[in-house]
Image (tube, helix red, strand yellow):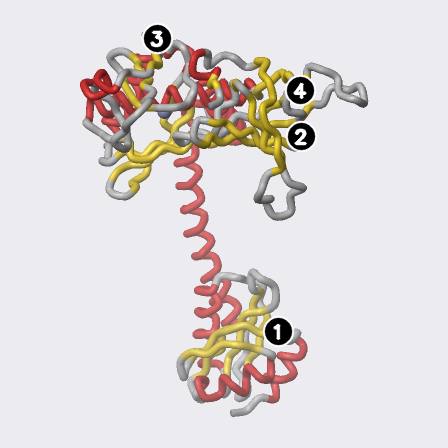
């Protein structure tokens, strides 16, 4: 059994311990050089559990070894099995030596802010809405919390406010192992029924929950609790939440976005939404105007086209399919054969729309496509598709084409 130092002091980020065992990892991850499993008599490294990832950091031998330099290894991961914590390291340490363990403290502090924030939020949701926490994931990019019922936007606002009230109250966070008898009388949140040594994390008036992870000492340490997103999830709701330093970074990032938008639009920061709304209105009006101009241009181009007993083949720069189709419709009465308009495709190459009132284009499509390196089809009076040949080749082919 490893003595879990983080149980009694969650703010212990440096500690000394003795190396009890060191062995190569049995199963190597594909492509890795292999890691070493190190067991200490005591550790402040939290092994993965309860939705929270393992701590990382270093272990440094206090005594110099044969070559004179104290060996230092990185703790990449940690897991617990039957009370023993295994530190997965990038090198070996000699059993019997003393080591100093140093945790990546900033990472641990952030995780504690988020995890304790999650307890406050889940306890508050349980108290005011009777929600059960049915899922929790704490990653380095933030955390998600799943509740078993949906919550509306007003309910979420109240939840967020009350959770932050609990932070402001700076309540003590108490952790303890009740006796079996005490436990049977205790009301606490847990995803499953627990027996044996159960660790309870209690925030008076806010939450009582079975949890093995390290937590802040007072709720004030959590800092801001901010719900970023809420989405329906398996009949309930999934919240994306950030706390503390991570919340500060998120707020900074969003503030920068708003500042950038406000500069681009020359709008005050609290008026960017109405400025974007105005811009979208202007864009829609321009689109409409643009479409009307395109139709005017189409009619003008059609008027310029002389009548012919043969085929018409044009290359246009316009990319609006509606306008091109209208041009084809206006050209069809001016020719005895087919009226073809080619225009640029977004992916490169050319697209086409071909119309005719004398030919059955559905039947002619195969021959047309073969001649222009094309693909496509449609109705007897109109086909459309794409072409890979150059416009000069297309023009030569279609000038001579007869069905
Ligand atoms: Zn927990």
Tell which tag, 1 or 3, sits nearer the viewer.
3
Establish if 14 lies above or below 384: above
Percent x, y of residue 146 = 31, 34
**Between marks 3 and 4, how big is the CA–CA gap?**
34 Å
Q: Which residue is mark 4?
A: 60
Percent x, y of residue 334 = 48, 81
Proximity of marks 2 and 1: CB atoms separated by less than 8 Å = no
First reached walking from the N terminus: tag 2 or tag 4: 4
First reached walking from the N terminus: tag 2 or tag 1: 2
First reached walking from the N terminus: tag 2 or tag 3: 2
Looking at the image, which is closer to me, 221 or 96? 96
First reached walking from the N terminus: tag 4 or tag 1: 4
Tell which tag, 2 or 3, sits nearer the viewer.
2
Q: Which residue is mark 2?
A: 92
Assign a secondary structure to mark 4: strand
Q: Which residue is mark 3?
A: 172
First reached walking from the N terminus: tag 3 or tag 4: 4
């Amino acid at each position: 059994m490893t003595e879990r130092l983080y149980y009694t002091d969650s703010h212990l980020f440096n500690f000394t311990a003795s190396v009890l065992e060191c062995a190569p990892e049995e199963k190597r991850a594909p492509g890795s050089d292999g890691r070493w499993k190190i067991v200490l008599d005591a550790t402040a490294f939290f092994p993965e559990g309860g939705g929270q990832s393992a701590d990382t950091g270093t272990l440094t031998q206090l005594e110099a070894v044969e070559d004179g330099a104290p060996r230092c290894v990185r703790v990449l991961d940690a897991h617990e099995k039957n009370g023993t914590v295994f530190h997965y390291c990038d090198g070996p340490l000699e059993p019997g030596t003393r080591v100093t363990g140093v945790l990546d403290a900033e990472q641990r502090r952030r995780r504690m802010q988020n995890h304790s924030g999650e307890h406050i939020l889940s306890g508050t949701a349980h108290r005011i809405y009777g929600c059960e926490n049915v899922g929790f994931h704490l990653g380095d990019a933030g955390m998600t919390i799943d509740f078993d019922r949906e919550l509306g936007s007003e309910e979420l606002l109240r939840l967020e406010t009350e959770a932050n009230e609990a932070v402001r109250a700076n309540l003590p966070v108490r952790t303890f192992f009740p006796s079996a008898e005490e436990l049977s009388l205790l009301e606490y949140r847990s995803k499953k029924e627990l027996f044996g040594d159960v660790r309870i994390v209690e925030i008076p008036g806010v939450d009582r929950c079975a949890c093995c992870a390290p937590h802040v000492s007072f709720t004030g340490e959590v800092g801001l609790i901010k719900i970023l997103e809420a989405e329906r999830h398996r009949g309930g709701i999934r919240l994306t939440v950030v706390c503390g330093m991570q919340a500060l970074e998120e707020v900074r990032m969003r503030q920068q976005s708003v500042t950038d938008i406000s500069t681009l639009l020359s709008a005050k920061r609290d008026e960017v939404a109405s400025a974007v709304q105005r811009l979208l209105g202007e864009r829609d009006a321009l689109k409409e105007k643009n479409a009307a101009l395109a139709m005017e241009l189409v009619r003008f181009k059609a008027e310029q086209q002389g009548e012919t007993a043969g085929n018409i083949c044009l290359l246009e720069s316009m990319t609006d399919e509606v306008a091109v189709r209208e041009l084809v419709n206006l050209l069809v009465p001016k020719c005895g054969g087919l009226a073809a308009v080619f225009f640029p495709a977004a992916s490169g190459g050319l697209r086409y729309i071909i119309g005719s009132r004398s030919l059955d284009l559905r039947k002619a499509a195969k021959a047309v496509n073969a001649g222009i390196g094309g693909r496509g089809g449609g109705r007897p009076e109109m086909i459309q598709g794409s072409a890979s040949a150059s416009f000069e080749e297309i023009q030569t082919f279609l000038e001579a084409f007869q069905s």
